[in-house]
Image (cartoon, rainbow, N blue to C red):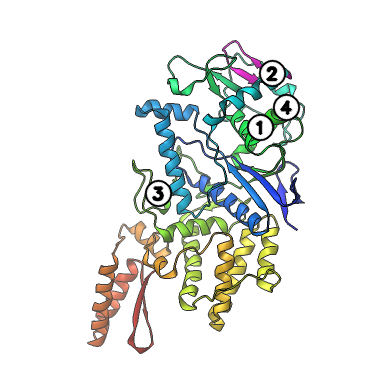
Amino acid sequence: MLQIYDSLSRTKRPFEPVQSSCVNMYVCGMTVYDFCHLGHARMLVGFDVVQRWLRASGYNVRYVRNITDVDDKIIRRAVQTDQPISAVTRFFIDAMHADERALQVQAPDDQPQATQYISQMIEMIEQLQARGLAYQADDGDVNFAVRQFEGYGKLSGKTLDELRAGERVAVSHAKRDPLDFVLWKSAKPDEPAESRWPSPYGWGRPGWHIECSAMSHSVLGLPLDIHGGGPDLKFPHHENEIAQSEGAFGGILANTWMHCGPLMVDAEKMSKSLGNFMTIRNTVGISPDSDQAQYQVNVREAEMLRFFIVRNHYRSAQNYAPDNLADAQAALDRLYLTLQAVAPAPVTIDWQAPAPAQFKAAMDDDFNSAGAVAVLFELCAVANRDKDPQASGLMLALARVIGLLNVDANDYFKAPTRYTQRALNAQALGSVAVLNDDEIEAQVQKRVAAKKNKDFALADQIRESLAQAGVVIEDKPGGLTQWRRG
């Protein structure tokens, strides 16, 4: 039976949806004011694996991930770039979808945008005010009265006196308590007209936290079977969602809370201020960030990034470091080399058979994709040892259940990669050579001719030169020479 670790109870529990065959899952999505970074990649891929496994397990899944398209950061971006807010959000929504496609992240069933649910947010604020949980302050903002909600802090596990106002929770003299958070922001004279709506409290816009409470209730109803997000959302965002939703509607917001682990860069938290901030497109794209929402994806590097994330448990901390990327690239290459060497037979997965049963047991244990990937490598070893197309085919079929091995093996190796150890060493020396297919083929034929003429020194020199450029030469029986990007 599927077991999921619940962040609220801090225990791993059997998963029992409200309706036995259906799962309503809501995951907090992106605020679309900039390109998605690697922390977003961790969340996108992590919950993509979750919904894939739920569907593979026979559930009818309704997966909803929202888009925040009104926010202080969006307004600042629009003002700085002299664009309408709608143009900024449309561009970054398109860019986000391009990142999702690069990482083989399936589209959610619904992607509600905050600006489409303003009336529902206002209705919810009125309910909270009627129940004594909200008040309009002297500055025009409407705030949630945290100390009036019994149980505030149950998700973060802290008392009110231990908690501090977090990101996006402005501390204002007009608040009754520093922990009170804004539900409705009064419009400022210098803000764009696009960022304000009429309400019983005057012109303004919703606070960040109320958006998800209103959208999850409107789209899925309560209680949610699963509510998820990144590790930084547990407090204050999810804590505030609980207070708003349960304060307005009663009952509980979600039966199961899931939070993926943090993604570090060289053991430090990823941060623009530290200069270690990495976007998805810079990591898997041939071109760096640009003024285009779409970009050319390097399929080999994109597969590596997804594999890098999936082969770790979603709750574990993960370190994005050159050596770890090179290790992930080498491991993924082994799987693709197997598909090249042992053509996979078409198979139907029998979940009672030994390897599928082990795979299922791992995934049913709190979506332990690390354990599932270990089964893939066991099948990889069998396929190579026995030249067994059934083992190769089963490896491929199971991998695709969690969104891996999506590229034809020959196309995969045609793509260069920056993430082999040799390539990383070359980058450090500033001597990266990027060759196109025709240039590589010309060098290979030159080496073939050198060997034919018994000029083995030249042949070795060409092999080493190609190796420095990330190209592996393989001499086959009968004088056949093949190459692949290594």
Label 2, on which residue? 129
In terms of image quadrants, where is residue 359?
A: bottom right
Label 4, on which residue? 247
**Residues under numbered marks 2 and 4 in contact, where contact means CB atoms less than 8 Å apart:** no
Element under label 3? helix
Label 3 to label 1: alpha-carbon separation: 33 Å
Label 2 to label 4: alpha-carbon separation: 10 Å
Residue type, numbered disc 3: Asn
137 magenta-colored: yes
Q: Residue at x 35, y 89 (%)?
A: 478
Label 3, on which residue? 282
Q: Residue at x 28, y 64 (%)?
A: 435
In terms of image quadrants, where is residue 277?
A: top left
Label 2 to label 1: alpha-carbon separation: 16 Å
Label 1, on which residue? 241
Horizontal relation, residue 452 to residue 391: left or right: left
The magenta span reads: 131-145
Q: Residue at x 59, y 57 (%)?
A: 312
Label 4 to label 1: alpha-carbon separation: 9 Å
Name the N-terminal-most of marks 4 and 1. Answer: 1
Element under label 2? helix
Residue type, numbered disc 2: Gln
Provide the major secondary structure of the magenta segment.
Answer: loop
Name the N-terminal-most of marks 2 and 1. Answer: 2
